[in-house]
Amino acid sequence: MTATARHMRPFLGKEWPALAGATLMTVLLTAAELAKPWPMKLVIDELFGGHEGPFELSSHDYRLLAGIALLVIGVALVDAIGTYFSDLWLQSAGERIAHDLRVALYDHLQRLSLGYHLRRQKGDLVTRVTGDVNAIGDLFAQSIGSLAQSALLLLGMLAVAFTLDPLLAVVTSLTLPALGAVSFAYRRRVRVSSRRQRAQEGEIASRANEALSAMTVVKAFGSEDLERARVTGPSKQRMVLGIEVSRLQARFDGLVGVLVAVGTASVVVIGVHRVAAGALTIGDLVVFAAYASRANTPMRRVAREWTRVARTMARADRVAEVLSADDMLVERPGAYSGPRARGAVELQHVSFGYEAGRPALRDVSLRLEPGEHVAIVGPSGAGKSTLGALIARFYDPASGRVLIDGRDARDCGLSWLRQQVGVLLQDTVLFTGTVEEN
């Protein structure tokens, strides 16, 4: 099982009642679609059969005609009921899946270490929480039901076709292997291109977020043109990739249309010969002709939705990539969470680096007594902020220990530790809300 499937399975499993109900409705919709040509077959074979020129309807014919009319209405009702509940359950399931996945992804992002967030572009992470998650929900709300119904309809048409005339059914199914091979080949190419497209979208979001968040600085230094160029480049790359995906989709649709047309032409030619040989009734040929003409729609729908699924799976890969990240501070079992700390802080031979081979602190030892005020000064990059980050346990030291009241900070609960340590950051951040809430 792939990492993407492993991470998505819990969210899909919770919605199995809705998905099971939608599956049942899909079966009803398929049955209704398969039944639509049969009233006309009954009219041709039972009412018109054996008559030449004007004729009068008997009482039996009137009863049969009334039954056919009721059959038409019944098929329409089944179709309407199946469509209503299928859409309702699938769209509701899609919304719940998107909500649960978004919350889980956001929670996981908050559990990841500060180092992870400093290495990643903020706009890219926001795109994964919003656009990528929404696309996964839309996949189940729209594509899955359409894909399942189209596939079942094709199978149902083949089953009925083999019942009516096996030879003509074989002719009808000759193009299916070619369609499957084409779908598989194009799905892989679309998925690769879509993954690259999503990466460029994340780059665009990150750069736009940086510039818009620091618009005062941008305007103060007159760097509007520079910021425009920084966004224009990734946007152009995204445009090129989008055109590539559109070109693949257009080629795919055109090739599917040709294959379907070849299959339909074969059915018409062979079907006429089968009727002439007496192997089929005219009504049977009408059913075959209806299926042949309607087969174009589900085949195209399967092709279109299959490529859409491939594009969405590229988004699911991006979400699973974040959920798979385990770069987080580990809270040890039985971590200390007692009364308020006295305030004794000690660093014992602490070394730390943000990047391998580039230490920010090397063998630092320091002791602060409760109530003591100590100012640590030095040039930019000397490690002053890093000391505070280690005491608040934003990071763990590469070697040495940070002690709070004589207890290793790694043995303390993160929630308790953050309540004991106050940090006044050098960057001013205002969150959305009132001044009081900030």
Image: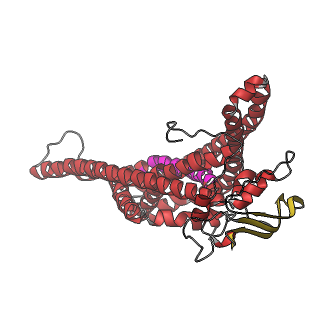
| Residue 366 locus on image (x, y percent) | 80, 63
406 and 160: which one is in front? Answer: 406
Indicate the quadrant containing the N terminus: top left, top right, bottom left or bottom right.
Answer: bottom right
400 sits left or right of 52 in the view:
right
Q: Residue furthest front?
A: 371
What residue lies at 62% left-to-right and 52% top-to-bottom? 315
Q: Which of 339 and 43 lies nearest the eye of the viewer?
A: 339
Expressed as whole percent of the image width and height from the top left, the position of residue 354 reads: 81, 57
Image: 264 above or below 54: below
Quarter of the view holding residue 316: bottom right
Q: Is residue 392 left or right of residue 303?
A: right
**Outermost residue toward the right?**
357
* Quarter location, residue 108: bottom right
Residue at the extreme bottom of the image, as rendered: 334
The residue range painted magenta reads 291-315
Q: Position of residue 357 (x, y in %)?
A: 90, 61
Q: Main secondary structure of the magenta part?
A: helix
What is the quadrant of residue 18 in the picture? bottom left
